[in-house]
Image: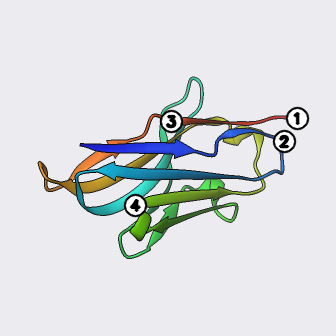
């Protein structure tokens, strides 16, 4: 199996920054796409940003120019640098990876989530 451990969430004032990290471990042969979703209270989970195995990225419109996703393949880690945070960014952020393991050619795995709260 694959385990994802997220860190870096917390409380920040509007305009502030946070950096989320997510480390994947387990019986991993290779990791394809990596990404971050978020879910605010009463709302559906939405894709925030994703990065492919070649480094291609995509972002939801509301975070373009403020958030940056990156990955370190040697460490099986994905990051989300969040700048100019707004109260609307408040949500639980979930890491996700598509990986090949010893039991599956490709499967999506999820982290447990980390809370990000933007408030003065």
Mark 2 — residue? Answer: 13
Question: Viewed as shown, does residue 100 lie left or right of 88?
Answer: left
Under circle 2, the secondary element is: loop
Under circle 3, the secondary element is: loop
**Residue 34, picture quadrant:** bottom left
* Circle 4 Cα neighbour tier, 10 Å, few/some/many (<14 / 14–19 / ≥20): some
Whole-Å distance between the Cαs marked 2 and 4? 30 Å
Question: Viewed as shown, does residue 103 lie left or right of 8?
Answer: left
**Residue 84, picture quadrant:** bottom right
Whole-Å distance between the Cαs marked 4 and 3? 17 Å
Q: In this view, does 116 lie above or below 16?
A: above
**Whole-percent x and y of residue 81?**
64, 59
Residue occupying image coordinates x 45% and y 54%: 35
Whole-Å distance between the Cαs marked 1 and 4? 34 Å
Whole-Å distance between the Cαs marked 1 and 2? 5 Å
Which one is earlier in the sequence, the residue at label 3 or at label 1? 3
| Residue contact at pointers 3 and 1, CB within 8 angstroms | no
* Disc number lying in front (4 or 3): 4
* Disc number lying in front (2 or 4): 4
**Whole-percent x and y of residue 75?**
43, 64
Whole-Å distance between the Cαs marked 3 and 1? 23 Å
Q: Quick one: quadrant of the N terminus?
A: top left
* Circle 1 Cα neighbour tier, 10 Å, few/some/many (<14 / 14–19 / ≥20): few
| Residue contact at pointers 1 and 4, CB within 8 angstroms | no
Residue occupying image coordinates x 55% and y 58%: 79
Under circle 4, the secondary element is: loop
* Circle 2 Cα neighbour tier, 10 Å, few/some/many (<14 / 14–19 / ≥20): some
Mark 3 — residue? Answer: 113
Mark 4 — residue? Answer: 76
Mark 1 — residue? Answer: 120
| Residue contact at pointers 1 and 2, CB within 8 angstroms | yes
């Amino acid at each position: 199996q694959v385990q994802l451990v997220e860190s870096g969430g917390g409380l920040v004032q509007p305009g502030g920054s946070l950096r989320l990290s997510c480390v994947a471990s387990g019986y991993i042969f290779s990791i394809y796409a990596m990404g971050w979703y978020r879910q605010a209270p009463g709302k559906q989970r939405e894709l925030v940003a994703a990065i492919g195995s070649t480094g291609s990225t995509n972002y939801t419109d509301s975070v373009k120019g403020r958030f940056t996703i990156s990955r370190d393949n040697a460490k099986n880690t994905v990051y989300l640098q969040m700048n100019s945070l707004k109260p609307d960014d408040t949500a639980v952020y979930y890491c996700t990876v598509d990986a090949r393991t010893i039991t599956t050619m490709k499967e999506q795995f999820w982290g447990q989530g980390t809370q990000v709260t933007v408030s003065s």
